[in-house]
Image (tube, rainbow, N blue to C red):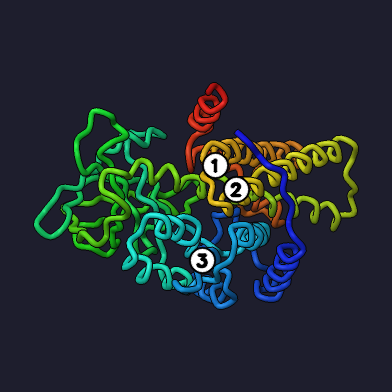
Amino acid sequence: MIFSPTALSPAEDALRHEVHRWLAATLPAGFRPGLGLGGRHDPEFSRDLAKQGWVGMAIPREYGGAGASTVERFVVVEELLAAGAPIAAHWIAERQTAPALLRFGTEAQRRWFLPRIAAGECFFSLGMSEPDAGSDLASVRTTATRTESGWRVDGTKVWTTNAHLNHFFVVLCRTSAAQDRHGGLSQLIVDLSSPGVSVSPIPLLDGELHVNEVVLDGVHVPDERVLGEVGQGWAQVTAELAHERSGPDRYLSVLGLLRAFLAERAEAGHALDDHAAGAFGRLAAQLWSIRRLSLSVARALEQGEAPATEAALVKDVGTVFEQEVVETLRELAAREIDPEGASLFERLLAECVLNGPSWTLRGGTTEVLRGIAAKALSR
């Protein structure tokens, strides 16, 4: 497991400042920041961002993208997350589906999907998790059965973010039996408007409707919508998770909360006491260290590597850090949790308390990720 030290080049740092200025001019006054990747689903914002060339940045120009590097994309994403921008519409398509199509997709799939993703016009969800499976992704029971004209898909997926709003999702399913439970899996691109697809929102503790249960009942998927090779779904999805687990979205969900706490103290004319200053110092040191790890993974991806283990570790330390921030600020604030509180900090704190427990679950539980890291270290 190797994290090579890396730093932003002058051009990459200049890009960061450009994005920061654009967001300051674009986001409306009084904008309430979202919690990292939990920002609002706003197709208009996604299209405006795409016009700047900042959606699908790593997609080659021949497919409608900017042909930018993985680290350049990292820089843009970091600023978007830090601002709590409404990125949910294009997020999964841009972060995960586009790289998968570039690596495993057919030329026809690339020509059709990638320009639409880069334009902020085609939105994807993920079809991985299933009922009763927990983080055991290999226990997939959704099946795809061969037909004369393609595949018949039957099964249920859960925690499918924004499936009620998006256009497609990539479904991990069983296409054949295999003694090795990691074998016989494939990925299919399913149109969420297809006959036989039923999407049911799952209300979260705060009443928000982000995630869904998706039932597939005899859904037809043509052969041209198979992603990659039939039977290679496990290897493909494992490679894909390096993009899902290592980015700034795994440690920046709480930055808006940190800023709101400091702003509230400043407005009230209250300086941080020694205890609060020490706590903030520790959190700042952790945040900067995790950022360096995440940037190292981005540089490795840029160089064509597949740092799946390193990505798992970044996700583990990142999401544990996010929960530590929430509990630290909850202690320092020493007040009742109030979703309708008078200050932005109070409202964001309540939102974080309600959503924070999910952060160490989504993208793989802490226990699973530590198992992945332990196996790599024992080799």
Instruction: Answer whether labels 2 and 3 touch (C-beta < 8 Å).
Output: no
Give the x, y percent position of residue 61. Answer: 50, 73
- Looking at the rendered structure, the kind of residue marked 3 is Gly
Which sits earlier in the primary sequence, circle 1 or circle 3?
Answer: 3
Q: CA distance from mark 1 to mark 3?
A: 21 Å
Mark carried by residue 216 = none
Q: CA distance from mark 2 to mark 3?
A: 18 Å
Give the x, y percent position of residue 88. Answer: 50, 61
Circle 3 — which element?
A: loop
Mark carried by residue 56 = 3
Tell me: residue 239, above or below residue 84. above
Instruction: Identify the residue at image location x=39%, y=64%.
Output: 165
Q: Quadrant of the N terminus?
A: top right
In this view, the mark in front (2 or 3): 2
Q: Is residue 158 left or right of residue 49?
A: left
Q: Residues within 10 Å of mark 3 (few under 14, many from 20)?
A: many
Confirm whether residue 55 shows in the render.
Answer: yes
In this view, the mark in front (1 or 3): 1
Q: Which residue is mark 1?
A: 307
Please tell me which residue lies in front, 275 or 307.
Answer: 307
Q: Which residue is mark 2?
A: 300
Please tell me which residue lies in front, 158 or 61.
Answer: 61
Give the x, y percent position of residue 244. Answer: 50, 48
Tell me: residue 107, above or below residue 82. below
Q: Residues within 10 Å of mark 2 (few under 14, many from 20)?
A: many
Q: CA distance from mark 1 to mark 2?
A: 7 Å
- Looking at the rendered structure, the kind of residue marked 2 is Ala
Q: Is residue 346 left or right of residue 197?
A: right
Instruction: Identify the residue at image location x=53%, y=23%.
Output: 379
